[in-house]
Amino acid sequence: MTTRRIRGAAVTAAAMVAGVAACSAPSSGGSDGKSADSVVIGVASEPDTLSPLLGYGKDGNSKIFEGLLARNADLELRPALAKALPEVTGDGLTYTYTLRDGVEFSDGEPLTPADVVFTYKTILDAKTNNTSRSELDAIKDVRASGDDKVVFTLKYPYAPFAGRTVLPIVPEHVAGEQDPNTGSFNTEPVGTGPYVLANWSKGEKLTFKANPNYWGGEPKVKTFTMAVIADDNVRATRLRSGDLDGAVLPPNLVATFKNDDGMKSYDAKSYDFRTVTLPTANKVTGDRAIRQALDAAVDREAMVDKVLDGAGRPAYGPLPVDDPWFAKGIERTQDLDKAKRILDEAGWKPGTDGIRAKDGRRAAFTLFYPSGDKVRQDHALAYASDAKKAGIDVTVESATWEVIEPRMKNDAVLAGFGSTGDPDFGLYTLLHSSLAGDGFNNMGRYDNAAVDEALDTGRRSQDPQKREAAYAALQRELVKDPGYTFLTHIDHLYVLADRWEGLSTQLEPHEHGFASGPWWNIEDWQPKK
């Protein structure tokens, strides 16, 4: 068989923009006791686990771990633990990686091909509680070859497979001695990355220290802390007081720093969308006419303008409008007359209070959003207002995820998703019926045979034209049979003290805070001269 070398594909879907604002900076050292080589960042949430075996860092940018490959600022694939991009056979079924020489885990033990094999096989084991397992469905086998090579054999050609190998590698000599679901490795990780976990106070903060033996060179930022602050306003207050060096903030709060001195704001374009799940088990949201009417009733442009202060784009589906895979022609504006007509024809008639009913059932349902998330709250309230104009009564409630999760089968949720790299990465877990109710995968339990077929074609074909046609058909089917009401694609906004060089943003997925943000490459930052 012929062999070819795979190339890292640049993602050109959305330009990354950095804007500058100013505010008073935290001290870079001195009376407040803050070290000049430390950084404290305010984030909205913390991970449940720090084990890649359970899904942590699966899309790259973990500071504790590394994958065979990583992505640069333009999201092109580049070598990380591997010496080079993989060798791929002509049939697209075999990928061979050669490991970099001299890489050690933070405990001093060398990285070996056995560690890579252990990582992937453990994740693929059905006994491991990893809800992202389907992302590695193409793998038939993974094995070591000699002292420095790992060979993946696929069940079928999977065009974006190399992008899956940013998945972090764990040490078999540590994690292999434990139950992957309950072992101490979940909170006491050992990796090859530029930082090691120094302390984790659950619900409060995680502190990381530079790995002095990192193969890529010891970072200039010696310590960084992720302060877990769920409330947007509290993060902004602590940033202004100097308690934080930076934070992720919603647009309205970033604007409050506009005229302050000594900080920069960063605007990262993203695949991150806000959407309303419409559970099929609910007698109201499971009705296709209700779903179609909601899709027509929502004013996406107003949400971008008023909720996001312009920092985003309308979402007509799961892919942003400037993505190369976006299906042109599915853009649509608010059409209340259409929404009312759909409901009339389906037998949902207005009551004396203006709310529609059918067979004695009111067109009413509850919409949850996570407590403390102002952006989701504002989306939910705007959505409820638009829905009421069509005669649908949406009750908005805030709750913790512990309360929301068991209710996702029957109640709508103001959710967020989005993944970079390839349409398969985000769409399969969002929509495929085989993953209905699998944790946060396919939360609304959407089931559409045409969408499943498109997802399977897109996943299994190497022909770019076939894949493009499949994903275009999928997006059009979602307009006809919406399992979600897609609202906006949001920009991710950050404010940081302007005392380091080398900061940038990437085109970001939904997840941001730990993995994404101007600190995605914190190991490369240099003190500002």
Image: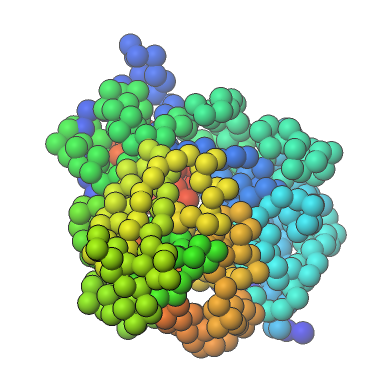
- The x, y position of residue 130, in whole percent, is 68, 52
Q: Is residue 390 left or right of residue 323?
A: left
- The x, y position of residue 308, in whole percent, is 25, 53
Which residue is found at the position 52% from the left and 29% from the top? Answer: 203
The mark total stands at 0
Whether residue 478 appears in this view of the structure is: no
- The x, y position of residue 108, in whole percent, is 74, 34
Q: How is the image coloured?
A: rainbow
Q: Is residue 517 above or below residue 156?
A: above
Quarter of the image for the C terminus: give it.
Answer: top left
Q: Nearer the viewer, residue 335 or 395?
A: 395
The quarter holding residue 481 reads bottom left
Q: Nearer the viewer, residue 106 or 224?
A: 224
Q: Is residue 497 left or right of residue 70?
A: left
Which residue is found at the position 69% from the left and 75% from the top? Answer: 88
Q: Nearer the viewer, residue 199 or 348?
A: 348
Whether residue 257 appears in this view of the structure is: yes
